Amino acid sequence: MTAALIALAPIIVVLLAVSGLFSAAETSLTGASRGRMHQLERDGDRAAQRVNRLLGDQETMIGAVLLGNNLINILASALATEVLTRTIPGAWGVAIATGTMTVLVLVFAEVLPKTLAILRSDDVARFLSGPTLVVVKVFGPVIYAIQFIVRKTLRLFGVKLDMETDVLAAHEEIRGAVEYHHSEGAVEGRDRRMLGGVLDLAEMDVSEVMVHRKSIDMLDADLPIADLVAQALDAPHTRLPLYRDDPENIVGVLHAKDLARAIAAAGGRTAGLDLMAIAREPWFIPDTTNLKDQLNAFLKRRSHFALVVDEYGALQGMVTLEDILEEIVGEIEDEHDAAVQGLRRQGDGSIHVDGSVTVRDLNRAMDWHLPDDHAVTIAGLVIHEAQTIPEPGQTFIFYGHRFQVLRRQRNQITALRVSPPLEAGPG
């Protein structure tokens, strides 16, 4: 019996080694960087191409690897049990064989190879991609049959699982990776905000970033031409809506460059200029348009300015290409921008903030995490949470911050004091 044990020992060692390769393949392939694999494949790396092919049907790959791994482990355990039960008859032989193989499989076929695969996921995945592809081809039909049985069984319990089921959306996977690397110190805060801004474009509407109609610089088209030109030159913006009779009645958009060309063509004289002939047709968009679609529309139309209306056609505000870009890169200021002190830091760590400052801008400036799902501005957030329009002096605690109303003008909160995150603030 000792001779049989010595003869089978190399076979068991080989089986454990193969099981270790299966374990390493499973861990490395599921943990490999898809971005790096795609880049390597574009550079002509055949191993990376095999990895991407395996990841294209990840469920089948994992199933085939697990099937092969279980077959090897069961075979190794069966051989060891067969030999030891002949040497030590009875339950003791089975117990010793079970304990010995459990330790050997756990250490050499599971923990050791998986630890190596975690440390060098990309390299191990590329190295084992060839053998794994062979295993998938061999066990593929069996895995498809198993998947069919599993889905039919789950359907009996009301769980519908399609072959194309995606467990994690790509955007959320990217966002999670960015947040993780930021917490590890590998991604700077500014870079994290920029990457997050790109991902947020499809989830935000233009109503969240537009300039409200009360803040739009407009020109009355019925004013004398000299006054119109003077106001246009004094305005800090190059594109100015023209209205007639009522600010809601926008009849055109005047571009400062078009106005300058017209004045130059008239020899510097403003008398006789027809601004309506110079003005461009206004572009109206619904307030429910998401930022990603609007960014594409700006690029397609080669236009940087749009007026936002609600479902009734009433003017709500305006949005520019710069407004959307600022959601990615942060505030963009030039030499003509007015210095608006919307946020003022105080010595005690709190801030004084204008009610019109957006929640998103405040979060970016202070690295806070106030929600912006129900309100665009800080004033709107307080009103939404308080379910009333507070009076000056009233204080509220929301989302771990203390909000104190400093000033109110009619039904509008114009200034607040916001504390830094409280140590035990409620969520």
Image: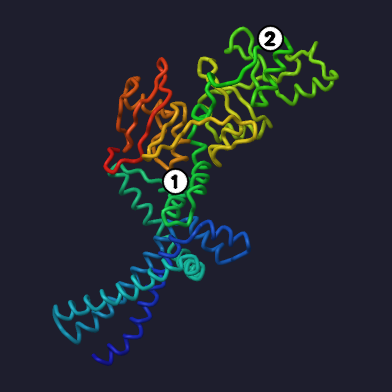
| Nearer to me, 342 or 202 | 342
Q: Secondary structure at mark 1?
A: helix
x 54%, y 21%: residue: 215
Residue at 54 percent of width and 63 percent of height: 50
> Label 2: how many residues lie within 10 Å, few (<14), some (14-19) or many (20+)?
few
Image quarter hosting the C terminus: top left
Callout 1: few (<14), some (14-19), or many (20+) C-alpha neighbours within 10 Å? Answer: few
Q: Which SS class for mark 2?
A: loop
Task: Please name the colour scheme applied to the rendered image.
Answer: rainbow
Q: Amino acid at mark 2?
A: Leu
Residue at image mark 2: 223
Q: Nearer the viewer, mark 1 or mark 2?
A: 2
Quarter location, residue 270? top right
Please give left or right for residue 380 compared with residue 340 in the image: left
Name above or below for residue 34 compared with residue 399. Answer: below
Three-letter amino acid code of the residue under disc 1: Glu
Q: Position of residue 333 (x, y in %)?
A: 60, 36
Q: Position of residue 44 (x, y in %)?
A: 63, 64
Say left or right for 67 vs 338.
left
- The mark nearer the N terminus, 1 or 2, is 1
Residue pictured at 76% horizontal, 15% vertical:
277
Q: Position of residue 27 (x, y in %)?
A: 41, 64
Q: State which quarter of the image contains the N terminus.
A: bottom left
Q: How many marks?
A: 2
Q: Which residue is mark 1?
A: 172
Position of residue 9 measured from the top left corner of the image (x, y, whole percent): 32, 85
Image point 49% across, 65% down: which residue?
Answer: 122
Q: Is residue 82 left or right of residue 410?
A: left
| Nearest to the observer: residue 135 or residue 420 | 420
Give the distance between the C-alpha atoms of the residues marked 1 and 2, in whole angstroms.
Answer: 52 Å
* Placement of 322 over or under 11, stated as above or below: above
